[in-house]
Amino acid sequence: MCIVAIAWQLFDELPLILLSNRDEFLQRPTEPLHQWTDKPIFAGRDEQSGGTWLGIHQEIQPYHHQNGRWVAVLNFRDGAQASDNERSRGELVTDFLTSHLSPMAFAHQINLLDYGGFNLIIGDTQQAVIVNNRGHAPTPLYAGLHVFSNGQPEDSWFKTERLRSRLRQEVLPLISENSAFEYWQDAAFAALSDTTKAPIDKLPKTGLDIAIEQALSSIYIEPIALSNIETTMPTYGTRTQSILTVSYDSKSINLSEKYHLQLNSREYQHTQHE
């Protein structure tokens, strides 16, 4: 259960500004943001499946070459049971970053039935496309602010509308004043760290118990016991917070991450790459 916000082609200097929270089981082994040695990818890595949830293309040699390709993937929460033969959604990220297809061409060639439910946002400096395997055909993003979570792209969940509002009021005006990352990053991470939960009457109906649904309704999910909300041992929460920006000419690509090592004490490691 993750969330992704994209300011697409709103600013001349930064055609892409992407903010993301990755929510995951705490025991799932994960590597923080780094340059992969086996693929031309700069990203965190899910050690269990080998893929990732958000990344950019970057080659190690000769000079950390970047081509402006980026991807984010979210799971789709609809109560459908996972199949044992489903491919990892993280492979969609690595497959696009290592391909030469345009975002739209790549989206059209995905074998949708191979994966569990997903929302996939793929792009470069020229085009951004969203597609899922729950009936949403590949669609280019229009210039504007887009916020996606684990439902249909057009769904208005409490957490998506709250993040949209905070970005419009607190973050985008700062970027308009000064697009330098250092000027607005604190406000952006503050918006991603909002723990306000939805009122009962604003919860989506996804088949989950109401108490668990409410615990998952905030932008930032504090550590919880996902299977039983009344237990004291947390099993799930926001693991990683990321901000990705791409300049118009692709010469400046910044991916900054807060990787939560010990969620109970809110300790984290902050890695930034330019």
Image (tube, rainbow, N blue to C red):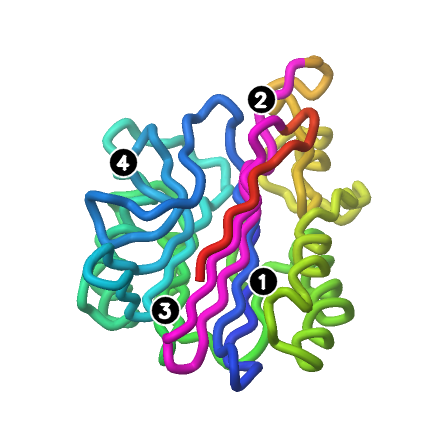
- At label 1, which amino acid type do we have? Val
Circle 1 is placed at which residue position?
147
Does the stretch in magenta take in 249?
yes
Q: Residues within 10 Å of mark 1 (few under 14, many from 20)?
A: many
Question: Which label number is shown at residue 265?
Answer: none
Which residue is pictured at 65% across the width and 14% down the height? 233
Q: Which percent across, then down, holds residue 78? A: 50, 42
Kindly report the distance in space between the C-alpha atoms of the residues bearing marks 2 and 4: 23 Å
Asked whether, in this view, residue 58 is left or right of residue 206, the answer is left
Callout 3 secondary element: strand
Calculate the distance from the C-alpha at mark 2 to the C-alpha at mark 3.
Answer: 33 Å
Kindly identify the amino acid type of the residue bearing the numbered disc 3.
Answer: Gly
Q: Is residue 43 left or right of residue 37?
A: right
User: Residue under circle 4?
Assistant: 86
Name the N-terminal-most of marks 2 and 1.
1
From the viewer's side, name the closer residue of 206 and 158: 158
Q: Secondary structure at mark 1?
A: strand
Question: Which portion, as a residue range, is magenta?
Answer: 233-262
Q: State the CA–CA distance, disc 1 to disc 4.
A: 26 Å
- The front one of 26 and 146 is 26
